[in-house]
């Protein structure tokens, strides 16, 4: 059953679930929801399993027409939502009717929100996942004006609560990291700078990764060439510019620049909500 039609995709609108692990050897990354915590929470509010697909809304500006009565929830960035021009709460269960128009403003804090419908967004899976991988092109294409979304029929019991606390805005985001595997390619001063400097998110920020800049670049102590190595979500790779890049969920499966540290798995959802201009620090987890 069709439940939503995209009238305006805003900045970027993709379908995401928990990704397609196990295909890195074939050159296909896991992909999936960048902020998995928010994706999972939106699904819980409508009684879906965490594996159900949601719509990932980047920054905002998306507009939908409701094609059939449906229960939904939106969790993630502080992104204003109106239904037929009237403000409605996010991070809670909503019931909308055929003909209603959902309009998202631009996020006040954070970057990504997740729209879950009861039954999940139903598109054909590719390699076991409905996720859009923006780097490799695997999975469904990004949604555009006119895209119609069907909802699935698999869901569980209604949850005991009908709201999910929004993540409090942070003035300076702190991400816990573990050093390595290539921290020995950098001077001790650069390793200290990684953990002591205040970093700022640049405009080079998408589902592949987040580039940050500090008062000074990180300098290598090792001048050799590094063969391509497997990459993971949260790897902090340092290219020749010295400006670190935090790899997110659509990262390449291999890379040839040294990884000075890796963000702890529990902090990856917070890394996924970083936006240009945000300040952050790294600390040992």
Image (spheres, rainbow, N blue to C red):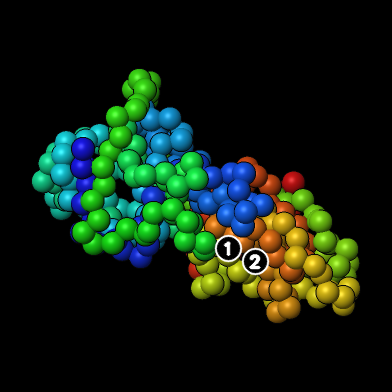
SS at circle 1: strand
Question: Percent position (x, y) of residue 135?
Answer: 52, 63
Q: Can residue 190 be seen in this view?
A: no
Q: Position of residue 107 (x, y in %)?
A: 37, 58
Mark 2 neighbour class, 10 Å CA radius: few under 14, some 14 to 19, many 20 or more: many
Q: Between disc 1 and disc 2, whose residue precedes?
A: 1
Residue extending farthest front: 26
The residue drawn where x is 58% and y is 53% is 29
Name the residue located 15 percent from the left edge and 44 percent from the top edge: 67
Closest to the observer: 226 or 204?
226
The one nearer the camera, 179 or 146, is 146
Q: Position of residue 42 (x, y in %)?
A: 39, 38
Disc 2 on helix, strand or loop? strand
Q: Is residue 150 above or below residue 163?
A: below
Other residues around mark 1 within 10 Å, as few (<14) / some (14–19) / many (≥20):
many
Is residue 23 something that shows in the picture? yes
Q: Residue furthest left?
A: 99
Pinpoint residue 68: horizontal percent, then vertical percent. 16, 39
Q: Toward the viewer: 82 or 128?
A: 128
Tell me where residue 21 sits by quadrant. top right
The numbered disc on residue 209 is 1
Horizontal side, residue 207 vs residue 158: left or right: right
Identify which residue is drawn at 23% across, 51% down: 148
Residues marked 1 and 2 touching at CB (< 8 Å): yes
Q: Which residue is drawn at 68% across and 61% down?
A: 254
Q: Mark 2 points at which residue?
A: 245
Find residue 157 and report its image quarter: top left
Q: In this view, does 6 lie to the left or right of 110?
A: left
Instruction: Place residue 216 in its image quadrant.
Output: bottom right
The image's mark for residue 2 is: none
Position of 178 relative to 274 (above/below) = above
Q: How far apart are marks 1 and 2 (CA)?
A: 6 Å
């Amino acid at each position: 059953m069709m439940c939503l039609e995209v009238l305006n995709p805003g900045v970027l609108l993709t379908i995401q679930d928990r990704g397609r692990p196990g295909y890195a050897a074939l050159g296909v990354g896991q992909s999936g929801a960048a902020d998995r915590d928010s994706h999972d929470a939106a699904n819980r509010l409508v009684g879906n399993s965490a594996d159900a697909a949601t719509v990932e809304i980047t920054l905002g500006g998306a507009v939908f027409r409701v094609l059939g009565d449906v229960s939904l929830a939106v969790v993630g960035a502080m992104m204003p939502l109106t239904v037929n021009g009237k403000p409605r709460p996010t991070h809670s269960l909503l019931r909308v009717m055929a003909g209603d128009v959902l309009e998202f403003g631009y996020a006040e804090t954070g970057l990504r929100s997740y729209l879950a419908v009861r039954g999940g967004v139903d598109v054909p899976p590719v390699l076991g996942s409905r996720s859009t991988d923006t780097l490799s092109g695997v999975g469904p294409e990004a949604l555009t004006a006119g895209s119609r979304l069907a909802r699935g029929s698999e869901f569980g019991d209604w949850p005991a609560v009908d709201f999910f606390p929004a993540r409090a805005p942070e003035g300076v985001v702190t991400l816990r990291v573990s050093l390595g595997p290539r921290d020995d390619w950098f001077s001790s001063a650069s390793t200290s700078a990684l953990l002591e400097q205040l970093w700022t998110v640049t405009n080079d920020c998408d589902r592949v990764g987040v580039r940050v800049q500090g008062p000074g670049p990180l300098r290598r102590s090792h001048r050799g060439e590094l063969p391509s190595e497997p990459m993971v979500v949260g790897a902090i790779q340092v290219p020749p510019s010295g400006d670190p890049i935090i790899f997110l969920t659509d990262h390449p499966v291999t890379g040839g620049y040294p990884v000075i540290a890796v963000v702890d798995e529990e902090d990856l959802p917070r890394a996924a909500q970083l936006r240009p201009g945000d300040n952050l620090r790294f600390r040992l987890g």
